[in-house]
Amino acid sequence: MDNKSMERKGKLKLGIVVVLVLFVVAGFGTFAYAASGNTAQLEDERGIFNPFTLSVMQVSSGSGSTAVVESVARPAIRIPVRPVLRSFFRPPLVTQTP
Amino acid sequence: MRTSEQMNIPLEEGKRVRMRMNRYNIYLGIVFAIVILSQSLLMAAPIGTVVENIAGRLNDEQIKNGISKGSWPGEANLTGSIISGIAVAYKLKCNIDYRRSAEWGGEYILWAAQGNYYGDEIYALTRLSQIASDPNDNPWRTVVTDFYDNVRKSIGGTENYVSNFYDIEPSTAVFYLSHHVVAAYYVDAKDKKIWREVLIYVLSRVDDSSIYPVMSLGAATWALAQTGPLDQTKIHSSGEGAPYWESRKLADLPDLLVSHQVQDGQPGAGGFYWQFWHTEGSPNGYTEDAIFATRGLVAAYYANPDPNLESAILKAHAALIDGVSLDGKVWERLSKEGSIFYTYSGEMLQVLGELIMTGDLDLDGSINSADYAILVNSWYASDCAHYCCCYGADLNQDGTVDFGDLKIMVDKWLEYSSR
């Protein structure tokens, strides 16, 4: 094996290692995200954990070859939120004319 | 030259013992200082200090010039709840700056509301009336009296005006109606009973789909307990209410509140859950929920002293005090997390004022010789119509500090000591 092919093989190995490292980092990141309570956005329509479908594609208009497909945010599972401040309300006060 | 070993002359036994004792004394002193220091750091600040911290910050940050003078930055529509709290701080600490701050806020409300007030605004005017030099005859009281008269004389009368509350989110409606009810009873408005009946009706529509279930339950209990009996009146009488209220009566309200308190040993103990249905991990610890639930419990306790309520109030008291930071900020959560709003501070001052024990004149959270000394210093003082004139020593509010007040103080002192 000549030096050139050795060099090429080395680069290939390095590439594989880089891809594997990226996979591991992405995996850890996904788990950290899920562990922090954000699993709602990582689940598909059936509620199954799927880190690779962070958004869904939806046909917004047309069909077949004319279909316009766009990425839409996945509807989050409803997590109740308490508003920080009340809304303001006073009824109208309609005084009688004398 | 002699070495140190050569100089090693045996010390006399007495001198050695004295030196050892001195060393022990120093060690004991250090240990004592550490214990005292750690206790002072761990102990919750007394209510008086917390009130000063909160009111001082509100006073500093109030808008003092221009068109918004008297309100607080970004919270003009919440001025009512804030100045009710400042008025309480004035009543407790007799600091004239707090009184001026509350009056500026009142003037802002008069200008902004133009004769038609939010519930917490009209209630705030009753608090200003309470700290006026003559609580029975002052411009604030006149404004409140005129408002309920104008509502009664408006097209459709009080019934038409209050019916507008049926169309909004029920827990928000309960919040405003509760304040209206207390204000209407304060001036003995002719239609005060209509306001109270409507409050009960709207409360029956609150459930977990509402925005503030437990907070509105607390606010309603607070208003209903001080304006009439918590009796066998059905809450769900019209049949249009939420299933939660079926077969429930006014007398059940205090126990319902207790059932929504976070129990000992759980995170956020002493605070309250946000919603009616809850398990251990359900959302809890919101400051406003704790404030209004505690106000409801206190009002119910005054109407009917019940040891279960007292125990719940003491737990809530500790949680509330812990929820205030040293610079007087009050957060969305008692854990000092979330948003910070001035209105939370005003509401906190209001509940702290209601948590003061009768007889605790120096506001240190206990009844002892220091309070007795304040009473003695005001002995036979007359003209106590105004709270600050006699440092709160006119406990029976008959205008004079005399044996009637001494009896109350002694009773409360004994009660506190035996607790």
Image: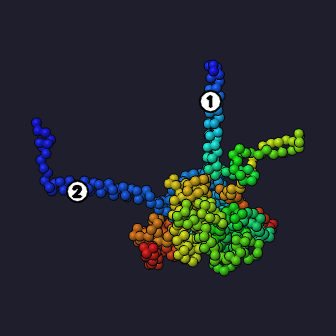
Residue at image point 66% right, 50% down: A38
Count of residue discs: 2
Q: Position of residue B285 (x, y in %)?
A: 59, 60
**Of residues B271 and B412, which is closer to you in this image?**
B271
A81 displayed left or right of A45: left
In the displayed structure, B13 sits above or below B152; it is: above
In the displayed structure, B227 sits above or below B288; it is: below
- Residue under label 2, please give it: B21
B151 displayed left or right of A68: left
**Of residues B91 and A98, which is closer to you in this image?**
B91
Look at the numbered disc 1 and give the secondary structure of its residue: helix
Q: Which mark is residue A14?
A: 1
Dot 1: chain letter: A
Dot 2: chain letter: B
Q: Position of residue B79 (x, y in %)?
A: 64, 58
Residue at image point 45% right, 68% down: B366
**Of residues B229 and B27, which is closer to you in this image?**
B27
Where, quadrant-wise, is the C terminus of chain B in this rendering?
Answer: bottom left
Q: Position of residue B252 (x, y in %)?
A: 63, 76
Q: Position of residue B181 (x, y in %)?
A: 67, 70
Distance between the alpha carbons at the discs numbered 2 and 1: 73 Å
Q: Residue B138 occupies which quadrant of the picture?
A: bottom right
Camera-nearest label, 2 or 1: 1
- The three-letter code of the residue at mark 1 reads Leu
Q: From this viewpoint, is residue B72 visible?
A: yes
- The three-letter code of the residue at mark 2 reads Met
Q: Residue B99 occupies which quadrant of the picture?
A: bottom right
